[in-house]
Image (cartoon, rainbow, N blue to C red):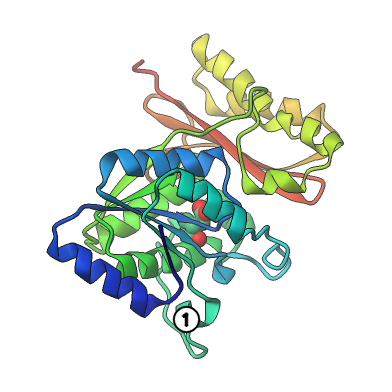
Amino acid sequence: MKLVKTIDEMRAFRKATRKSGQRLGLVPTMGALHEGHLSLVRAAREKSDLVTVSIFVNPTQFGPNEDFAKYPRNLESDSALLQREKVDVIFTPSVEDMYPADAVTWVTVEGMSDRLCGKSRPGHFRGVTTVVSKLFHIIEPDVAFFGQKDAAQVAIIRRMVRDLNMPVAIEVCPIIRESDGLALSSRNAYLNPGERKSALVLSRSLQRVQKLFDEGKRDAERLITAGKQEFAKEPAARLDYFEIVDPDSLEPISTILQRALIAVAAFIGNTRLIDNILVDPQF
Ligand code: PAF
């Protein structure tokens, strides 16, 4: 496994591998790896000849009062995990290399970037799409792997790739959960034992809505109300949003007649967590 720290070195590696026609899979991450990330790495291993994992805590996707400074960074344990998964390259550029001091160029997926998490985290998705397009330009992957947990991120990246004719396939892997239902997230590490229990309200609210959906309920407002009722019973949680939207456009849906994304975000103490399910009346 190669540890690549500069853009120049990454480009040189890619140039050499292009000649031999090897298919490169990229798993973009911010590190603090867990089983969710490793499931993406395993999918990449299966579907590509070479696997690159980028580890870069991207400053431009954090708001001024968010957790950029304290975001968990542990390259040593991340590298050990990736070595075990037979990753070929870890790309860990510096902030200075990725963002020249006078950089003023952004990639924005307009409209969609202001929905769901984009509403309460202004500029977040602009930071994500900018860094992901940089990674795509530097690494030139044939295929890139993202987790369904960040469903809005997936929709926005897919749109960016389509709109900008980027020659990369996007693969999406299912949410990985703890046995009690909590979706894996690097931010779960912030939760104290009490908060860890309270955090189950996210998956519980989605399960309640899933049950109503399975019983035939299709009215989005009523389903959202049922989901929100779970939060009313959990005083340690502060709901950010509970929404039902089209999974491709992220536009709100009033009646579920086709595939729909049911997405929730909430603060448990100071920790902001997200979760979602996809439902489809055809199945
Ligand atoms: O999902 C993440 O970890 C980040 O948003 C990503 C895609 C690595 C961009 O920084």
Q: How many marks?
A: 1
User: In screen coordinates, is 49 left or right of 108?
Assistant: left
**Vertical position of residue 113 compared to residue 221: above or below:** below
The residue tagged 1 is 97
* Percent coordinates x, y for residue 177 in the rendering: 58, 30
User: Is 227 located above or below residue 12 in the figure?
Assistant: above
- Residue appearing at x 35%, y 71% in the figure: 10
| Nearer to the camera, 5 or 179 | 5
Callout 1 environment at 10 Å: few (<14), some (14 to 19), or many (20+)?
Answer: few
Quadrant (top left/top right/bottom left/bottom right) for the C terminus: top left
At 36% across and 39% down in the image, what residue appears? Answer: 43
**Direction from residue 23 to residue 228 in the image, left or right:** right
User: Residue 175 at what x, y percent from top left?
Assistant: 51, 34
Q: Confirm or reject: label 1 Cβ below 8 Å from ligand 1.
A: no
Quadrant location of the N terminus?
Answer: bottom left
Q: Nearer the viewer, residue 122 or 90?
A: 90
- Where is residue 226? Give x, y as percent: 67, 23
The kind of residue tagged 1 is Asp
- Lateral position of residue 2 relative to residue 19, left or right: right
Give whichever of 267, 113 is nearer the camera. 267
Q: Write down the quadrant of residue 200 in the picture.
A: top right
Is 198 left, or right, of 283 in this rendering?
A: right
At mark 1, the secondary structure is: helix
Q: Work out whether residue 129 or residue 230 is closer to the camera in this orientation and state it.
A: 129
Please tell me which residue is depicted at 29% across the width and 57% down the height of the picture: 161
Q: Residue furthest bottom?
A: 102
Residue 222 in percent (x, y) is at 61, 23
